[in-house]
Image (spheres, helix red, strand yellow):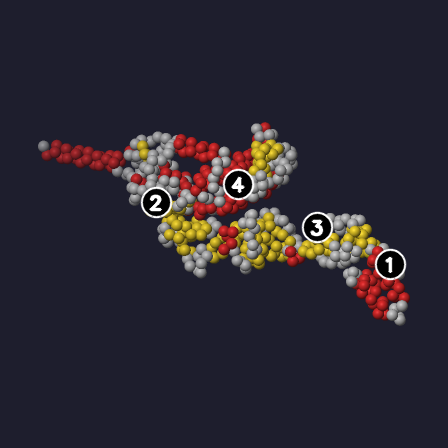
Amino acid sequence: MKKIDKQTIIIALATLLVGFVVGGLIFGGGSSAPKDETAHSEWTCSMHPQIRQAEPGQCPICGMDLIPLDADQDLNTDPLSIQMSPTAMQLASVQTAKVVLQQPMKQLRLTGKVQPNEQYVSSQVSHITGRIEKLKVNFTGEYIKREQVIAYIYSPELLTAQKELFEAQKIKATQPALFQAAREKLKNWKLTDRQIDGILASGKPADNFPILADQNGVVIAKKINVGDHVSQGQALYEIADLSQLWVLFDVYERDMAWVKTGDQLSFTIPSLPGETFTGAVSFIDPVIDSKSRVAKARVIVNNNTGRLKPEMFATGILESPIGQGEVSVVVPKSAVMWTGQRSVVYVKIGQGNFMMREVVLGPSLGDSYVVSSGLSEGEEIVVYGTFSVDAAAQLAGKPSMMNKAGGTTMTGHQHENMNMSQEETADSRQEITVGADAKAALRPLLADYMQIKNALTRDNYSQAQKAAEQMKKDLSEVDMTAFEESSHQLWMQIQPKLSASINALSKSMDIQSFRQAFIGFSENMIKVSMTFNPTDTKLYIQKCPMANRNQGARWMSIEEEINNPYFGSEMPKCGEVTHRFGHSH
């Protein structure tokens, strides 16, 4: 009996040990055991977090595969906040940054043009009355040197004065004053002692007398031809010394408070890529142009190398401090959304949780804003991907830019119809209020477009790429506060498509793919120009029926003459003007 009991105990202990081992393999080691994905109680869309389903599947809005909703992800710190999963934030490129205090610096982007220095421009006149017999300088752009012969003139008066000189020379010994008076008479006609001595040495009067240049410079205007009769003091040429030039920048009325004499300004020239020039503002026009509403700010630059040429375009950056050294809250423009009546940002209140907050904006600083109230130092806000966060808030029925109180939102299908309606409104050119500030904000885009178009007409792919990159930068710097409420909504619809078409240009691998992307890009720019009319210049819409694989394609130009950007030098004149619009039409 004792022996049986002992065996029973051993068997029981062994069974118990095996049970512990098997149980540990089944129920223990949770980190190594595969998770059962169906065990998640809820599933959501990474791009549309308002979608919640009890089982895996696809998002009914965008068709993406649903992802499991983590238990801690569903804990909103505030019922009005918007929650985004880490995957959604990554796909939407959402980035945040802490608010800091800094000295506000107003940054102005100015456009200008190189011009001759008016102090270095003069008229080359004839000091003698007579007839032009020969021209030694026959075209504008020719460089002349001081005392260079520029023309020959026949002058009866000068011929008589030379004869008087010879007669006075004969009685020089007895009448030296008379001889000196004869010389002075010639010198009054700007003849040099050297020329007078040459006349005396030749022994006879000169019929065709040389006219000498008074200064060094480049001929910028030719005002005479052979055979013309000129009087004393009449201008023959306009001559400019281009060793020193002016760069005249347009300063709009709203920006004049930020530009002062002595401010340092850096600028670039599109035709001289990779170089940056600097100078100080030496003069500001005291009168604003009544049509363009701009004043000219003058920067003087040395041009000893001759690389800068009049009429070159320039883009300048000027930074001006605001206040007397006080620090303020400054946030990037990409962090702020403006509805026409209020400005909002998204503040991070927890991991993946954001709360919309209204702020009061101060001055625009170029790429950033001063925030007068609504934010404090140390708070964390969304600085990139703000529109994606706002879109998620709208779809989730939370307070958003366009819906302050929150509530039911439109479906994707309804949203698409809304876009279509507003596109049709833009195409039909519905009457909207477009202020001077909005026009000015869009004017650099039109200038960039013309640079791209002109580069394509010259088959210059690299210049077209550089102009497209500049336009991408300029588009990101468009000041949303410049738009009034009626125009703001239309710009909000057009801007994303314009941005996408510029990105398509940037992704091109050669000029052929660039020209293909230019088709849609031009259509978007035509819509912008016809809707907002940002320029005082007449614009021409032109179309080539052979472009786009014989389906036709349009472009814009400030000139009526056809220069085809789709074929360049291959077929430069293919096309016709289909529409004209602008200030003068």
Among all residues in the image, which is located at the extreme left?
1
Distance from Cα at disc 1 to Cα at disc 4: 67 Å
Please tell me which of labels 2 and 3 falls first in the chain: 3
Q: Nearer the viewer, mark 2 or mark 1?
A: 1
For disc 2, the marked residue is 355
In the figure, residue 117 lies in which quadrant? bottom right
Q: In this view, does 291 lie to the left or right of 63?
A: right
Vertical comparison of 445 with 230: above or below = above
Distance from Cα at disc 1 to Cα at disc 3: 32 Å
**Residues at circles 4 and 3 in contact by the CB criterion of under 8 Å:** no
Residue 244, image x, y percentages: 64, 56
Three-letter amino acid code at disc 4? Asn
Residue 533 numbered mark, or none: 4
For disc 1, the marked residue is 205
**Residues at circles 2 and 3 in contact by the CB criterion of under 8 Å:** no
Vertical comparison of 175 with 375: above or below = below
Distance from Cα at disc 2 to Cα at disc 1: 96 Å
Residue 353, image x, y percentages: 34, 43
User: Closer to the camera, 173 or 58?
Assistant: 173
- Element at badge 4? loop
